[in-house]
Image: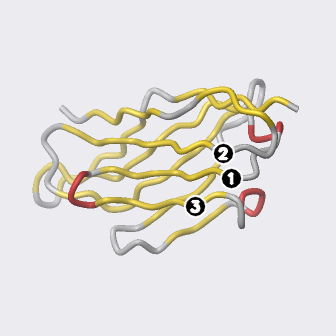
Amino acid sequence: QVQLVESGGGLVQAGGSLRLSCVASGSIFSINAMGWYRQAPGKRRDLVATITSSRRANYADSVKGRFTISRDNAKNTVYLQMNSLKPEDTAVYYCNADIELTAGVWNDYWGQGTQVTVSS
């Protein structure tokens, strides 16, 4: 069984920083893309950033220049460094990973989410 566990959320003032972490554990053969998504109350879940196994990153326009995604393949971990936070960044942040369980068998997994609240 595979699990994604996020950590690092919390309350921060506008202009501050937070670092989110997400660890994938369980019976994992390999991991392809990993990413972060967020969902504000009453809104849909949107992409924040993704990163491939070769560390090619992609960002939503709203976070470019402020957020940085990275990963440690040896630790099956993905990070999201969030700087210059704005109140509109307030949301539940979810980790996502495309995981190969055995050779040729892939599944998409989500974490339980971590709350990020930015006060003005």
Tell me the CA gap for discs 2 and 3.
11 Å
Q: Give the number of callouts.
A: 3
Q: Residue at x 81, y 39 (%)?
A: 14
Are the residues at dot 3 and dot 1 in contact (C-beta closer than 8 Å)?
yes
- N-terminal of the pair, mark 2 or mark 1, is 2
Q: Residue at x 75, y 46 (%)?
A: 85
Vertical side of 49 occupied by 111: above or below = above
- The quarter of the picture where residue 65 lies is bottom right
Q: Nearer the viewer, residue 49 or 75?
A: 75
Comparing labels 2 and 3, the label whose residue is closer to the camera: 2
Tell me the CA gap for discs 3 and 1.
8 Å
Label 3 residue SS: strand
Tell me the kind of residue under disc 3.
Thr
Vertical side of 8 occupied by 58: above or below = below
Residue 51 locus on image (x, y percent) = 46, 64
Q: Which mark is residue 68?
A: 3
- N-terminal of the pair, mark 2 or mark 3, is 2
Tell me the kind of residue under disc 2.
Ser
Looking at the rendering, in which quadrant would you find the N terminus? top left
Are the residues at dot 2 and dot 1 in contact (C-beta closer than 8 Å)?
yes
According to the picture, the residue beneath numbered tag 1 turns out to be: 83
- The quarter of the picture where residue 21 lies is top left
Q: Which mark is residue 17?
A: 2
